[in-house]
């Protein structure tokens, strides 16, 4: 993940936990700095329609992404969007992966959205970045699953209050319990070690 973020041009905050973490680290972050894809997509789709941008979405189970794409086309007349499911062998030099890259290249999208879950989507983008024929690439997780109604969509006000994680945990406990109940403690442990190491260094210098 560190390597992935080192090659990105822009990084945005998709979660209140990052806002809180940033503030602990002294960054001037506020709740309004959070940009979730459910909030971003309507603006992006409208802009893409007006400017005739082509969008390619890679991810979700077979049929799910195309269902979501039809819904988006109905909401945004003229939206150009093509999809391919994320259930393929993503081995970099494998025939399935090469076929996906060729399909993306043939469509020549302005925006490629990759929704294959973290960290698979980031790994895929990192491994194939030189062969991806798109002007911009977004890693967007289960975005189209939410649009298609495959996963319950949290009310937008819950996200603004910082409790979207709880809604998702209650909706998909088997899939998300580790992400929301275990992984944060690992992050906090790393931060504690960094803080203690920094404090020790300062006291030694003093």
Image (cartoon, grey):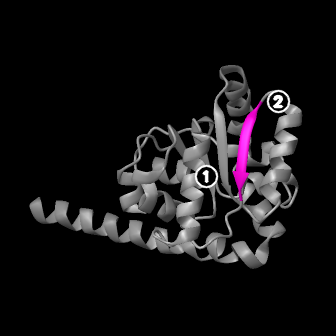
Residue visible at 36% across and 50% down in the picture: 7
Residue with the mark numbered 1? 103
Q: Position of residue 154 (x, y in %)?
A: 82, 52
Q: Secondary structure at mark 2?
A: loop
Residue visible at 41% across and 47% down in the picture: 8
Assess whether mark 2 and mark 1 are in contact (beta carbons under 8 angstroms).
Answer: no
Q: Indicate which disc residue 137 carries.
A: none
Whichever of callouts 1 and 2 sits on the residue coming sooner in the sequence is 2
Q: Secondary structure at mark 1?
A: helix
Front-lying residue, 65 or 39: 65
Instruction: Answer whether residue 180 is visible to the viewer in this image.
Output: yes
Reply yes or no: does residue 114 show up in magenta: no
Quadrant where the N terminus is found in the figure? bottom left
Reply yes or no: does residue 82 show up in magenta: yes
**Is residue 206 shown above or below 178?**
above
Residue visible at 25% across and 62% down in the picture: 198
Front-lying residue, 21 or 133: 133
Eye-nearest disc, 1 or 2: 1
What is the magenta segment's predominant secondary structure?
strand
Name the outermost residue toward the top.
Answer: 50
Q: Which image quadrant for residue 102? A: bottom right
The region drawn magenta spans: 79-84
Q: Position of residue 71 (x, y in %)?
A: 87, 42
Quadrant where the C terminus is found in the figure? bottom left
Q: Which image quadrant for residue 86? A: bottom right
Instruction: Answer whether residue 139 is visible to the viewer in this image.
Output: no
Q: Indicate which disc residue 76 carries.
A: 2
Q: Is residue 171 left or right of residue 12?
A: right
Front-lying residue, 52 or 145: 52
Q: Is residue 116 left or right of residue 175?
A: left
Residue visible at 33% across and 64% down in the picture: 195
* Marks 1 and 2, how far apart at CA: 24 Å
């Amino acid at each position: 993940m560190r390597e992935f973020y080192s090659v990105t041009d822009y990084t945005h905050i998709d979660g209140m936990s990052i806002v809180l973490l940033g503030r602990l680290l002294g960054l001037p972050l506020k709740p309004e700095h959070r940009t979730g894809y459910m909030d971003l997509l309507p603006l992006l789709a409208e802009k893409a329609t007006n400017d005739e941008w082509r969008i390619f979405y890679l991810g979700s189970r077979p049929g799910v992404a195309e269902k979501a794409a039809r819904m988006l086309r109905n909401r945004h007349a003229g939206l150009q969007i093509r999809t391919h499911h994320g259930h393929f062998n993503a081995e970099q030099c494998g025939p399935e992966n090469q076929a996906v890259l060729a399909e993306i290249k043939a469509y020549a999208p302005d925006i490629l959205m990759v929704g294959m879950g973290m960290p698979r989507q980031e790994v895929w983008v990192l491994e194939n970045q030189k062969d991806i024929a798109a002007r911009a690439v977004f890693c967007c997780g289960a975005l189209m699953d939410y649009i298609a109604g495959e996963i319950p969509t949290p009310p937008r006000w819950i996200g603004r209050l910082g409790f979207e994680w709880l809604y998702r945990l209650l909706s998909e406990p088997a899939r998300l319990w580790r992400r929301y109940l275990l992984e944060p403690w690992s992050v906090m442990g790393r931060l504690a070690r960094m803080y203690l190491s920094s404090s020790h260094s300062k006291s030694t210098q003093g």
